[in-house]
Image: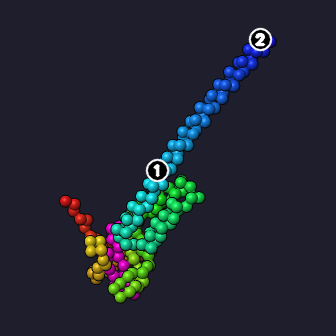
Amino acid sequence: MTRELDSLRNYDEHLQRMVDAQQQAIDSLEAQLDGVQLTQRGVIPLLARMVDSLDRFVELDTPFLLDERRQRIVRLRELLHQPDASLADKYRRVMEAYQIETDYGRTLEAYRATLATGTGERSVDFLRIGRVVLLYRSLDGADAGVWDPRAQSWQILPQQYQSALKQGFRVARKQTTPELLVLPVQAPEESP
């Protein structure tokens, strides 16, 4: 009988150690969950500030593909307010938008869009060379312009650049191999 009692006491002590270990594991998991909830509460405002910064950047940047870029920001704002979207998906989409904006700085692109003029709007071809220069050419090729970031307006492109502009469009459309293009580029402003 004492042997059986000792065996039951040992078994009871073993079970108590298991319960204690499980309680420690539960306490640890609860602490981790609290940490995750605190992190989530901090990440959502951070993502919202990142989208706000991206929005300001787009509005201050060279005015290319503005509708597309603004729509991307609108979709991001909507996504941040969707309760069924995961935090990971929200983060991924904000990072993708930043990557797209970064890629604009190192690519050459030709596209057709609408240009607002003093007399209305007209369809033109745009040539974007990174964030360095943005040019347009009328569909008939009669006139062309370059974006002046200092004046925040379009300037008439001098006739001497017409050939280089035509070549730039051909390179952007992959109709010819890349080559040196001589186009007007604003020199960066010197900081004091």
Q: In this orientation, which residue lies closer to the viewer: 151 or 174?
A: 151
Q: Position of residue 59 (x, y in %)?
A: 37, 69
The image quadrant where one finds the N terminus is top right
Please provide percent x and percent y for residue 87: 53, 54
Tell me the mark number nearer the camera, choosing from 2 and 1. 2
The overriding secondary structure of the stretch rendered in magenta is: strand
In the displayed orientation, state which residue is furthest to the right.
1
Say above or below: 129 vs 38: below
Horizontally, residue 110 falls left or right of residue 189, namely right
Find numbered disc 2 in the image and state the secondary structure of the residue it sits on. Answer: helix
For the point 35% across and 88% down, which residue is it?
119
Q: Which residue is mark 2?
A: 2
Tell me the residue that label 1 is attached to: 42
Q: Residue at x 52, y 61 (%)?
A: 81
Tell which residue pokes out farthest to the left in this image.
Answer: 192
The amino acid type found where label 2 is placed reads Thr
Q: Residue 188 versus residue 31: which sits nearer the camera?
A: 31
The answer to whether residue 140 is magenta is yes
Instruction: Find out whether residue 134 is within the magenta segment.
Output: yes
The residue lying toward the viewer, choosing from 92 and 32, is 32
- For the C terminus, the quadrant is bottom left
Q: Give the Cα separation between the discs numbered 2 and 1.
A: 60 Å
- At 47% across and 59% down in the image, what residue appears? 94
* Stretch of the chain drawn in magenta: 131-148
Quadrant location of residue 181? bottom left
Would you place residue 133 above or below residue 3 in this image? below
